[in-house]
Image: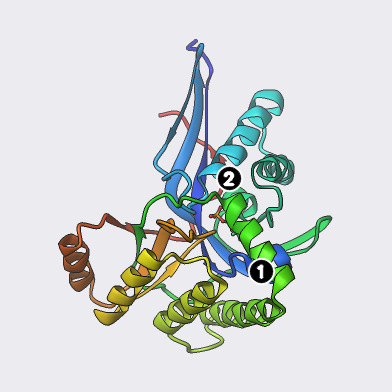
Amino acid sequence: MGKRVVRVSAPGKIILSGEHAVVYGYPAIATAIDRRLTIFKSGNQKGIVSDIPIGSGMGSSAALAVASAAYSSVLKENSLDLGKINSTAYKMEKKRHGNPSGIDNTVVTYGGFLWYRKETEGLKTFSDIKIKRKLPRLFLIDTGRPKETTKEMVSYVSGIYKAKSSTRSLLLDIERVTKSFLKFLLREENSSFRELITENEKLLERLGVVSDSTLRLVKKIERIGGAAKVSGAGGKKGASGILLVYHPERSKLLSFTKSQNLGIFSVELGKEGVKVERNS
Ligand code: PMV
């Protein structure tokens, strides 16, 4: 008999709508993507491989937390208790960024498309969204790793939340867009994907989580007929992590990114959450 091989993988994620607002009890929509982090042990060898960029809003730290919790659960109990894995990963996320909403670890654990709301610290509600339409082909452009960590961005928003009363109405506007997004996914509303992304981005810009260089890039994408939004915590000074990009004409977008020397890749949404990989 060969040595026991254990391999557990967890996906990266993107937030479609509601980042930052979700920290204050407003809803958000997130989805698991086709990039994964795998933890494995074969004999004495333990390793981690991942194709999720680090610190760019694609859930690399949540994937590591969830996969680690799942890995221990498989070794100890030979099973995946998703509820337990999710709460262990949430505790790890709390150590990392202080006041997380819990959306990252939850979508990475359960996968699919998720409607998420943190009612209070002790009650977080979430629901799988069974989407009723085919989404357009989407792309990610990595504007680079932000100078600020997620923790710093969350604490920046917390500062303006306390200091500026107008922040509350901005978060309510974000909630409105998130609900429209949900209705769009469920085919209850015929808004356009482009409008939802554009409106989303404008609100994040007003919140102050989009840097000047990222803002210029978004404007250029809009000028060639596309739409783009920061996804995740964003960044103020340098880069802002990943941009979720939509364009009706793929070739136009790709020739634009080529001319600007930008890395771009297509992304699939609604992928599986944490799982044990079968040995081949
Ligand atoms: O870690 P990121 O960049 O995916 O950001 C997480 C999303 C925030 O809403 C900014 C923070 C949170 O805990 O929900």
Q: Percent from the top left, x then y, of residue 134?
A: 41, 73
Location of residue 85 in the rendering, given as x and y in whole percent from the top left corner: 69, 41
Rendered position, 115 above or below 2? below
Tag 1, which secondary structure?
Answer: helix
Q: Within the displayed image, which quadrant is ligand 1 positioned in?
A: bottom right
Residue 62, disc: 2
Q: CA distance from mark 2 to mark 1?
A: 26 Å
Instruction: Name the residue: 70% across, 45% down.
Output: 94
Q: Residues within 10 Å of mark 2 (few under 14, many from 20)?
A: many
Quick check: can you spot residue 127? no
Q: On the picture, is 79 further left or further right than 278?
A: right
Residue 10 in the image, given as x and y percentages of width and height: 53, 42
Q: Is residue 238 left or right of residue 166?
A: left
- Say which amino acid is labelled 2: Ala
| Residue furthest out toward the front | 163
Q: Can I make out residue 121 in this image?
A: yes
Residue 146 appears at what percent x and percent y? 45, 52
- Picture quarter with the C terminus: top left
Residue denoted by label 1 = 160
Mark 2 CB lies closer than 8 A to ligand 1 = yes
Compare residues 112 and 174 and report the one nearer the observer.
174
Amino acid under label 1? Answer: Ile
